[in-house]
Image (cartoon, rainbow, N blue to C red):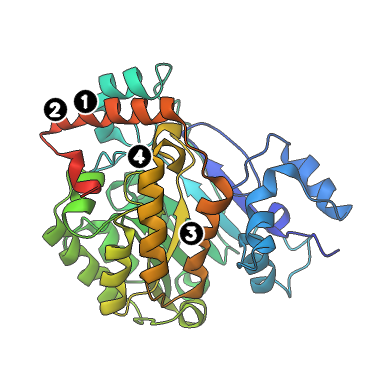
Amino acid sequence: MNNLCKMPFLHKYVNVIDNSEKPCCIFQGKEPLLKVRESFLNNEKPEGCSECWRREDNNILSKRQYFNKRFKNHDLNSGIKTFDLRLGTTCNLKCVMCGPHLSSKWHEDIDIFKKYVNSKIENPNQKSIDLNFDDCLEIYFAGGEPFYMNEVYACLKKMSMNQFNLENTKIRINTNAIINSNNKILKILRKFNKIEITVSVEGYDKVNEYIRYPSNWNEFLDGVKLLYDMSDRPKTIDEIFNCDKSFAFNITVSSLNLLKVFDLFDWCDRNNYVYVANFVEEPRILNINSLQPKIIDKFYKKHEEFKYRFNHLKDIAQYVNDNYKYDENLNKQMESYLLALDIKRNTDRNILYE
């Protein structure tokens, strides 16, 4: 079965924010989980798995391929081995591309979000959960900001009392790195033998401060040092996959940072950090189709001049080539949205396009 993905069989995605259940975090379809499993058993390609097929068509490692490789020795009846947990919205930042549905701090600006992005946003109806991690080989926490979430602390405390978890369960955390050494989750995390830290960053210095408002670049660097020093300091993608304590940056490319992303790549390269990238699809007003053609032309010029350290990042230009279609209405909506945020936050969006 060449099309098989083991994730619907060995992985559990839990989102208490919207109570959703799907095969994985990037699944874009509406097929129920049982239907997706059936499709894979019939060697079919579920429509909702388009992101993996797109990456594979461009010779880029997909989530499906990586998961299958990692669990090649596990059959489909092995039970749940990995968890993806979205346990709440508690957050210390209100990033421009985020919103009150994922960040509690965004409620300070909810009037702007409702006016320009989604007028029907509702308060999440979070439910309590009780999960069994006894045989879990990997658990991934996203937020919100996991390092500020009591729900994450409760899970880690429970797992820290289980010797199997301490020795064998990889704890994966996606964070904005605005933390200090007294953080209680950071302290308990040090007890585990296997950890994977992924730091979200969208720009170098002031660009990141604008997008990941109200972060401070120097505080970000302090947090990065704390987390990086906990890791095995991997320098390549292969080392990421083969070390017990990994560290990498995840860069989300959008209309906000497409022109500035190469400055961030350069900073990562100079510091020998490993980094990967993906694209914003929602909110639509911040995807690349809201950018005028002249901005895209400037991007291609920078792309041609940049010396990529990681070949997989060239996929960014391919994505732009395959998906860009200028939408003037989106451009106007984006401009109005950013202007409203600038007025309320005393920021300046022009820093993104200088």
Q: CA distance from mark 4 to mark 1?
A: 14 Å
For the point 58% across and 50% down, the residue is: 322
Q: Answer with mark 3 or mark 1, whichever residue precedes in sequence.
A: 3
The vertical placement of 31 against 353, above or below, is above
Mark 2 or mark 3, which is nearer the start of the sequence? 3
N-terminal of the two: label 4 or label 2? 4
Read off the residue under disc 3. 316
- Residue name at image x 48 percent, y 57 percent: 140
Amino acid residing under circle 2: Ile
Type of amino acid at the residue the image marks with label 4: Met
Q: CA distance from mark 3 to mark 1?
A: 29 Å
Q: Position of residue 106 (x, y in %)?
A: 27, 32
Q: Residues within 10 Å of mark 1 (few under 14, many from 20)?
A: some
Q: Which mark is residue 343?
A: 2
| Residue labelled with disc 4 | 97
The residue at which mark 1 appears reads as 340
x then y, percent, for residue 96: 29, 38
Task: Check disc 3 and report its element: helix, strand or loop.
Answer: helix
Question: Is residue 48 found left or right of 216 in the rendered image?
Answer: right
Q: Foreground mark, 4 or 1? A: 1
